[in-house]
Amino acid sequence: MKSAEKDRKLTFKEWLEHIWYYYKWQILILGLIAVFIIVATVQLFSKSEPDVGIMVVGKTALTAEGTEDFKEVCYSIMSDYNGDGEKNVNYLELTVSDEDEANAAQYNFDQTALQRFNTEVTSGNSIIYLVNEAYYERLKEFGVLSKLSDVLPASAIPSETVDEYGVYLRELELHFAEGFRRLPGNLIVCLRRSPEEDTITYGRTMEYWRANQLFFRNMFEYKHPTEE
């Protein structure tokens, strides 16, 4: 009788119950791994490459709403430079104190922010910088900035500039735009050198840099609508 029971073939339901009873933890773990791989693959292929990269460093912290307003203004003055069907801004914000900003050489840098800043300069997506005076001085020490006269027409450069590399945000009409108006006016707007001129190989293409240059020019030529 027992031999007959052993020889009886299991039904499909019984077979599933048998497998689940002995291997349920292995099945659960494999299932979680499969879900992770599927989600990661979908995100990888659906992720849009940035058209421009902007890094903001200063005594500021945009809310989620403020960040969206900032990006909406960016979208309004930019094109789909990389032709992927989407406008995409890579926005990085590092909130730091402006204490002792007047003397950049003695500035007490926040080490976490400084490390992230250095990483972005050496290998990140950011080409356009809006930074406080202390971090602006660091960018000049790195030797990575473009001269305004090399990337902008003379008509787009404000009469008041910090020096040949940067302009205070308050000098641009863009500072009146929603999102941008929430940023301190004393942030300095500047552009990174092209990869062909840069001493640091940071992995960006000339096409990506040219897109940022076009957007940088649009920032300077922006005219804020006048209220009637």
Image: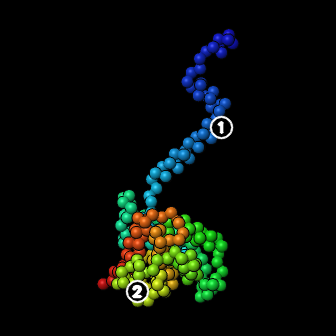
| Image-quadrant location for residue 149 | bottom left
In the image, 58 versus 199, the foreground residue is 199
Compared to residue 1, the image places residue 200 above or below, namely below
Compared to residue 34, the image places residue 60 above or below, namely below
Residue with the most extreme right position: 2
Mark 1 Cα shell of 10 Å, populated few (<14), some (14-19), many (≥20): few
Q: Is residue 115 visible?
A: yes
The residue wearing badge 2 is: 158
Residue 33's x, y, as percent? 59, 43
Q: What amino acid does circle 2 point to?
A: Pro
The residue wearing badge 1 is: 25
Q: What amino acid does circle 1 point to?
A: Trp
Compared to residue 69, the image places residue 108 above or below, namely below
Secondary structure at badge 1 equals helix
Disc nearer the start of the sequence (2/1): 1
Residue 148's x, y, as percent? 43, 81
**Front tag of 2 and 1:** 2
- The quadrant of the rendering that contains the N terminus is top right
Mark 2 Cα shell of 10 Å, populated few (<14), some (14-19), many (≥20): few
Q: Is residue 71 visible?
A: no
- The quadrant of the rendering that contains the C terminus is bottom left
Residue at left offset 47%, top offset 81%:
165
Residue at left offset 35%, top offset 84%:
155
Compared to residue 12, the image places residue 30 above or below, namely below
